[in-house]
Image (cartoon, helix red, strand yellow):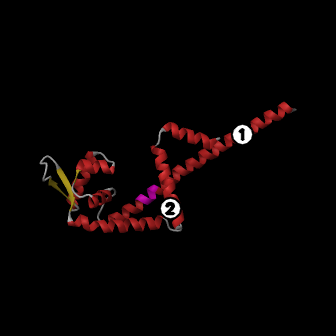
Amino acid sequence: MAKKDKSEKKKKSGKLKTAAKDDMLLAHGDLGMAMTQAARSFRTVQTRKLAQCGLYAGQEGVVLLLASENGLTTGHLAQKLGVKAPTMTRTIGRMEAQGFLERKGSDTDARLTKVYLTPMGQATVERIFAANEAVVGQATHGMSGKDVKQLLKLLALMDRNLHGSGAEIEENIEEHIE
């Protein structure tokens, strides 16, 4: 009987571990889908708000970066915003045609062209902040300030985890499964 009891316990504990893994995978699958959907919804609403400023998605980052550091090269803008140089060149060309930016040769190095906000681009900065505040307000409606702080902490942790080493993350996953 003792042997049968032990084998029954092993089977039950194995089933429990499998069930825990299945629950965790389901929860994480749901988490990934929920995060993707929330990010997509956030960006959709943000894009609509920014369109009221005359901007397309992604252009607000260029305006805000130049508002804090006017006179950057295309390469520096691309690097700081995490996009490829050809993408940034097209974005700058479009924004220049819209009247938000202008390109000027560098005073110190004739080989460089720098990008500057026009007065119209500078006037857009406050409208971008207002649009972003409206989107954040809509997204966090019903959350307390404490909830929002906790959400920011958790998202920052997830971002760090996703940029961490693979082995480190695998160990953390195994710890949560067992």
Residue shown at 47%/53% (left/top)? 156
Q: Which residue is mark 1?
A: 15
Where is residue 40 shown, x and y percent of the image? 44, 56
Q: Amino acid at mark 2?
A: Lys
**39 w.r.t. 171: above or below:** below
* Crowd around label 2: few <14 · some 14–19 · many ≥20 (10 Å): few
Q: Which residues are magenta?
A: 39-43
Q: Which residue is mark 2?
A: 149
Q: Which quadrant of the view contains residue 45?
A: bottom left
**Would you place residue 26 above or below residue 9 in this image?**
below
Residue 58 on image: x %, y %: 33, 56
* Main SS category, magenta section: helix
Residue at 71% over, 37% down: 14
9 sits left or right of 58 in the view: right
The percent coordinates of residue 26 (x first, y second) are 60, 47
Which of 150/48 is in front? 150
SS category of the residue bearing label 1: helix
Query: Can residue 8 be found in the magenta stretch?
Result: no
Task: Using the image as rendered, state which of residue 80 and residue 56 is in the foreground.
Answer: 80
Taking the view exactly as shown, the residue that stands out farthest to the right is: 1
